[in-house]
Image: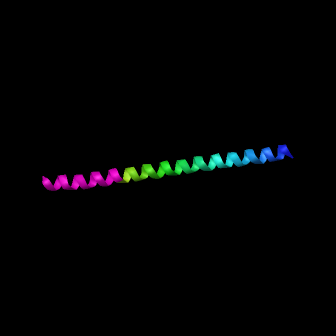
């Protein structure tokens, strides 16, 4: 009885850890995507203004 409960608990913990790792990975991925977007737009805007000044 106790062993069965422990195995279910360990499976639950593994799933929870896996889920949180997945969640962390998704957040990091989205954050990097967002940063790339910001950098890209900043470069585009500064570049276009810079070329307009010339």
User: How many numbered markers are drawn?
Assistant: 0
Q: Position of residue 53 (x, y in %)?
A: 13, 54
Q: Position of residue 3 (x, y in %)?
A: 83, 43
Q: Is residue 37 magenta?
A: no
Q: Residue furthest left?
A: 54
Q: Residue furthest right?
A: 1
Q: Residue at x 58, y 49 (%)?
A: 22
Q: Is residue 46 magenta?
A: yes
Using residue 1 as the reference point, say whether residue 24 is left or right of it: left
Q: Residue at x 38, y 50 (%)?
A: 36
> Coloured how?
rainbow
Which region shows up in magenta? 38-54
Label the magenta part by its dominant secondary structure: helix
Q: Position of residue 24 (x, y in %)?
A: 54, 48
Foreground residue among 7 and 29: 7
Using residue 26 as the reference point, say whether residue 31 is left or right of it: left
Q: Residue furthest front?
A: 2
Q: Quadrant of residue 2?
A: top right
Q: Position of residue 32 (x, y in %)?
A: 43, 49
Q: Residue at x 83, y 46 (%)?
A: 4
Using residue 16 as the reference point, say whether residue 2 is left or right of it: right
Q: Residue at x 25, y 55 (%)?
A: 45
């Amino acid at each position: 009885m106790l062993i069965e409960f422990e195995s279910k608990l360990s499976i639950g913990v593994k799933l929870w850890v896996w889920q949180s790792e997945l969640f962390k990975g998704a957040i990091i991925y989205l954050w990097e995507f967002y940063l790339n977007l910001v950098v890209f737009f900043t470069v585009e805007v500064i570049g276009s203004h810079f070329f307009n000044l010339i």
